[in-house]
Amino acid sequence: MALGIISNAIVARYLGPEQYGVIAYALAIASFLMPLINLGSDTILYDCIARRRSAYVIANSFVLRVVVSILLLLLSLIYLLYSGHSDANIWIGLFIVASVMVKACDVLQIYFDANHDSKINSVATVKASSLALLFKLAAVAMLLPLVWFAAAYLLQAILVWVFKLPKATHIHLLKPSYIRWKVIKVLLSRGKFMALAALSILLYTAMDKIMLGQMLGTEAVGIYSAALLISIGWLFLPGAITLTLMKGISKTKNHPQHHHRVQRLFSIIWLVALVVGLTVFALSQPVIHLIFGEQFAMSAQVLQVYVFGSIFAAIGSASYRVLIVHGLYRFCLIKTAIAAVINFLLNYWLIQKYGVLGAAYATVASEFCASIALNACVTKLPILILQIKGLMAVPSFAFTEFKRHWPALKAKIR
């Protein structure tokens, strides 16, 4: 994430808010292809791999994703060719779309995470990000046009695969005997609600940038995206914690200690999110000035608002995985669809009234609804109560953990 922030900062300083906004706008639109490619099977794959039932599922999911990706790439090409875009914009669109598709086909990410081999994913990502950063630095030094920076996204996505494949020789992604229509039908049947839910999530997380681009132009998108990059840059931390603990939570689904484990997960996520989120809020102005420069000064105000949405997003991501463990696919779809409608209406109203800040206000309200408020409608699982109890337990949890680890920490300091 640090490499990503550095990389985007260099590009943003070179391109300026308007051209940087073009890249961000293209990424926001292309991101809607992600749930159409993975078809909601990420969580299903994780669960199957964690339970050691993965060979057929992972192969069939990969083949299905590749087929859908090829079809969507062709449709994107047809649209770009016949929509009157310039040659440069066509290439930018194709590079961005292709990068999203390569990422969506990365079933190895899920496989290694589920087997607690996340180090492989991390090393591959760091190597790919480092080489992509060097590519962007060279493009800046050579004063290359915008299209080269779009190509860097595709290069990075491909390099992640290149560095992972040597560690995955035992996984038969294209073994013909593993491809079963019956398995594909199950993936489509179980994943359709998750795909629609993921699409709804994207609607209320990417709609702000799209509406800003339509209503205020790409410069506003560039200002907004700079703040967004810092605001969500730390979300890998609660995400990693959730991935680590979800395997144990999934296995104790019917155990008396299940609710206690879920509440403990929420306490950890609340603690991390509040500490990091409030720190980002306090340091927003110097951080934006240092990383992006004076031309992105407005991004600091956006960051101060948006960071609260990131706090809700962190707890919402953990809640989403708990809901999936309990098979509440339909509820996740309905909840995210409602949040998407709320986000659209609020964006339309608040962007006209407050400009770029209005999009941040709309996203924070939508994240709160999707991550916390709408969980009150769940009857099968007291998810909202566990979230509240987890928040209330943060002080005692932090004190207990500090007391437990203080002797070892003190010894290291000495």
Image (spheres, rainbow, N blue to C red):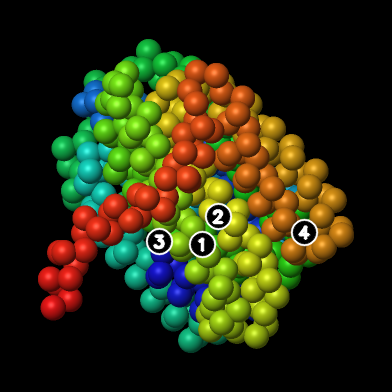
In three-dimensional space, the C-alpha distance between marks 1 and 2, rounded to whole angstroms, equals 7 Å
The reply, left or right, for residue 177 in relation to residue 369 is left
Looking at the rendered structure, the secondary structure element under dot 1 is helix
Disc 3 residue type?
Gln
Q: Earlier in the sequence, mark 3 or mark 2?
A: 3
Q: Residue at x 15, y 64 (%)?
A: 408
Of the two numbered discs 1 and 3 in the rendering, the one whose residue sits closer to the viewer: 1
Residue nearer the viewer, 187 or 246: 246
What type is the residue that disc 4 sits on? Answer: Gly
Question: Residue 309 appears at what percent x and percent y?
Answer: 60, 53
- Say which residue label 4 marks: 358
The quarter in which the N terminus is drawn is bottom left
- Indicate which disc, 1 or 2, sits on the residue closer to the N terminus: 1
Element under disc 4: helix
How many angstroms separate mark 1 from mark 3 (CA)? Answer: 28 Å
Marking on residue 277 = 1
**Tags 4 and 3 touching, CB below 8 Å:** no
Q: Earlier in the sequence, mark 2 or mark 4?
A: 2
Badges 2 and 4: C-beta atoms under 8 Å apart?
A: no
